[in-house]
Amino acid sequence: MDMDKLVSLCKRRGFIFPSSEIYGGLNGFWDYGPLGVELKRNIKDAWWRDNVTLRDDMVGLDCSIIMNPKVWEASGHVGGFSDPMVDCRKCNGRFRADQLAFLRFDTVKEGEAVRTPVFFFGVGSSLEIYKQNAKRIDKLNDSVKPGEIMHRTEGTFAEADEPVRIRFECPTCNEVGTLTEPRNFNLMFETNTGAVADGSSKVYLRPETAQGIFANFKNVVDTSRMKIPFGIAQIGKSFRNEINPRNFIFRSREFEQMEIEFFCHPDQAAEWYAYWRKTRFQWYIDHGLQSDRLRLRDHDPDELAFYSTATADIEYSFPFGVSELEGIAHRGAYDLGQHQKFSGKDLTYFDEEKKERYLPHVIEPSAGADRATLAFLCEAYQEDQVGGETRTVLKFHPRFAPIKAAVFPLVKRDGMPEMAEKIYRDLKKHFNVFLDEKGAIGRRYRRQDEAGTPLGITVDGQTIADGTVTFRDRDTCRQWRVASAGVVQAVRDLLEGQPIPAAE
Ligand code: ATP
């Protein structure tokens, strides 16, 4: 699948536009158009329904985007939420050093998690040499003091068995030796509250929704009668000043997250981790992502944050490579512990039945609504042959389809437009539907195929005679007749998974 084709379809059909496009856009920001907003909303609604509404052990929250900055000190984001950035002096390209490299690990500094990137650049054959030497280099890294960034512009590793020569090359202009020393770049957007912009008014746009949940854990326990094990879910905007926003809506600077913090007894945490890892993976499969493009990757022990005993990423094979859709992390008691320390408030939980007080452990399934939207778009995009012509079709799961059915009068006479309008009005009370009266019927079908509309409903000559309408299935183009009085129920049944009638 060609990413450019998808981007252009998204633009042409009103799924996704570059933000503030009439002014030339803004790198890393996107707007959802009339079809896109329905698609993303359907994904978020399905996530909310499956993870909150249909469960007894989950509640929701909607926290403010700007919070007391102490939240971000406690979470480690003020000190450690940064990416190493390098610039090319020749072409002015800016890169995330760890994306040019292949080694990175976390170190611990005074009990806090501090991401200390240790990296080695390399291109071409030298990258392969580094990969082979990764284990030896790891040992070498053990000697690096916490917080220290090890970086050399050119040189050899004396400790490695065989000296490895490091070459630095700009990935854009391929010039050697033009990259600057890496600088740590904090990804949080800063702003000020109130009229005076001084140090005391500095606040941050949240880089994740999770911390609002931890900060409200006590409020929820005190007010909702939820008993552990239980989870809190939140969907909302997050902001990261990404060094290289890219790959369409995959990595942007403003995006939406769908996060769960599931609180449980430390003895049950391993079981709940296994449960969420499996459940979240299955959710994507159930909504149409083919399992051979989807994978669940467990982190190696050396990839884990120091407080996490297990983390898995749900990854999807996008046209630009295999990348993370969602992470499921066993975070232990780290977050509540940090907030307890920084706020001075007791965040322990008291189990009335067992008369036991403890700090709950947390399992965090953290997904991105925009990345999910992109994965579902990539998966749905197909070109096939219909009647000797190539058509572009978005084969969305019916739950996600922006428009559920389109109603067409075959011609604009003989009472057909009036009948079509009545069916459209009846359906509109229940579903997002579309009425299209203009153009050849084949063209109208194609337009809806491109929008991903699962059902077409045509009022034709036979409707006048026997009161039935033609139903058309988007994926197979198969057609069959349904009594017009039963259209609402027929659409509901089909959207809920009832198979379409077999061909006659
Ligand atoms: P990456 O390594 O790709 O930067 P991450 O591991 O930092 O991602 P998390 O902090 O675990 O991401 O965030 C949880 C989820 O939020 C991700 O799985 C992704 O779906 C989404 N997300 C994170 N950053 C972005 C972004 N810049 N644009 C869109 N979605 C994002």
Image (cartoon, grey):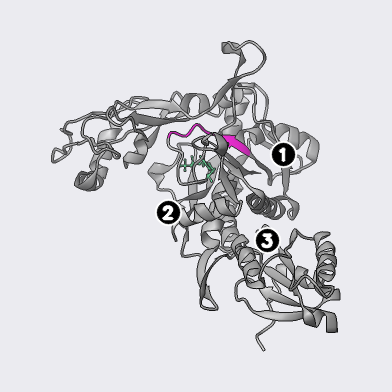
Pick the quarter of the image with the N terminus.
Answer: bottom left
- Amino acid type indicated by mark 1: Leu
How much space separates mark 2 and mark 3, taking CA atoms? Answer: 25 Å
Q: Position of residue 126 (x, y in %)?
A: 20, 44
- Quadrant position of residue 121: top left
Amino acid bearing label 3: Arg
Q: Which numbered marker is on residue 399?
A: 3
The magenta segment: 237-243
What's under tag 2, amino acid-wise? Val
Q: Tell me if 72 is positioned left or right of 137 in this view.
A: right
Q: Residue at x 72, y 65 (%)?
A: 405
Q: Nearer the viewer, residue 50 or 28?
A: 28
User: Residue at image x 85%, y 64%?
Assistant: 426
Q: Which residue is mark 1?
A: 61
129 displayed left or right of 41: left
Q: CA distance from mark 2 to mark 1?
A: 32 Å
Label 1 and label 3: CA atoms lie apart by 24 Å
Measured from the top left, where is residue 329 in percent x and y?
53, 45
Q: Earlier in the sequence, mark 2 or mark 3?
A: 2
Neighbourhood count class around disc 2 (C-alpha, 10 Å): few under 14, some 14–19, many 20 upward? some
Closer to the N terminus: mark 1 or mark 3? 1
Q: Is residue 218 above or below residue 266?
A: above
Q: Which mark is residue 503?
A: none
Do the numbered discs 1 and 3 sit on residues whose CB atoms are within 8 Å? no
Is disc 1 placed on a helix, strand or loop?
Answer: strand
- Splitting the image into 4 quarters, where does residue 105 fall? top left
